[in-house]
Amino acid sequence: MEGAVRESQIWESPVLQSVLPVVDAPQHVRISEEAIRQVATWMAYEEFAPIGGGPAGPFDVGPDPTRMTNLTMLVNTLNFAFTDFATSVKFETEHNGTTYVDSEAMVACMHRAITAGEPLLTGEWAARVTRDDLARLFRGNIEMPMLAERVQILNDVGAVLVDKHQGSWSHWVASCAPALYAGGDGLLERLPVEFPRFRDVSRWRGHEVTIAKLAQLGLWSLHLSLARVGVKTLTDPWRATAFADYIVPVALRVMEIAHFTPALTEAIDNGAEIPRDSEEEVELRALSIYAVARLTDEINALRPESAQLISPQVDYRLWKSYHATHHPHHLTRTVMY
């Protein structure tokens, strides 16, 4: 994108660097730099979720770092596809008198089961779980999409945890350097290698594009969660990007930051499936990562040094506002988001 500044420390992210070839020559998605600057003029003055973590939420499992780690990584192992591909209806469930939608509904189901004493936080449970088990676990307004894929993912991840990490995500985290990137020993470097379900990479016109949505989201969520009990997970959180999913493109479209070709717009609005790894899908995700980084820079230019933001904070601002929206989002059958 001509005229865009890419000099702040958030541009050190290898993920952000990998999407730049797509950003510089997109065919289906266009980002308006003027709209980014305009949105920043009012969003800069909002309150954002802190990096250091906040109070316990509705799905709290107590202050034990091991339980917190195991739940966070379990959630992000399954954090994909909550909209029915045929009807566009989103998964919902009720828990403790509140109706939750989308990924929050999934976590509500997990919290309900954990509170009832079910051993969801163990690798042994994941390694042996069946489709019937998940159907009972995820009770809601519709059947959770892609149950068979979820079973296979859990079985594969659970087998690695049991075989190499005492059945615990916490054990794996402790074996890594406390950073996203650390010369190959960082959490984000090791996660997709040791657990291939997190290898979120596409090809676009000869370029390898790393998105790493669930890997980054899981580690960022863990960083926030453990900060509440005084445990620091990441020494380099600014290297995390936006978490490219279905929702961020909706927010960017509503704010007139993202513009799509007529054909892509029609496909999204009509609920047509956008194939995984198609040019359109890669551009939707890559341009979302870029746009959030640029929006973060423009917002930071209007905020004091003590209130600077990083991409995940802006991403959450967008996701939280639009994840339950009735506005159509693109549909892609994938386990990556």
Image (spheres, rainbow, N blue to C red):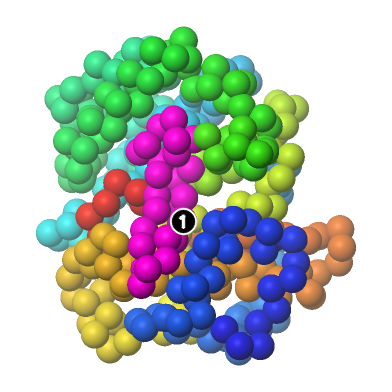
Residue under the point 12% across and 59% down: 86
Above or below 184: residue 112: above
Q: Please state if 64 lies on the left or on the right of 106 as rendered.
A: right
Residue bearing the label numbered 1: 210
- The reply to whether the magenta stretch includes residue 60 is no
Hey, which quadrant is residue 137 in on the image?
top left
* Residue at position x 67%, y 63% in the image: 11
Q: Is residue 261 left or right of residue 84?
A: right
Q: Is residue 313 visible?
A: no
Quadrant of the image occupied by residue 193: top left
Q: Which residues are magenta?
A: 191-215
**Quarter holding the N terminus?**
bottom right
Name the foreground residue: 4 vs 32.
4
Is 290 or 22 nearer to us in this picture? Answer: 22
Location of residue 250 in the rendering, given as x and y in whole percent from the top left corner = 41, 71
Identify which amino acid the numbered label 1 is placed on: Thr
Residue at far right of view: 305
Could you say where residue 315 lies in the image, as x and y percent from the top left? 56, 60
Q: Say which element carries label 1.
A: strand
Q: Position of residue 155 (x, y in %)?
A: 27, 24
Dot 1 alpha-carbon crowd within 10 angstroms: few under 14, some 14 to 19, many 20 or more:
some
At 35% from the left and 26% from the top, the residue drawn is 157
Is residue 197 one of those drawn in magenta? yes
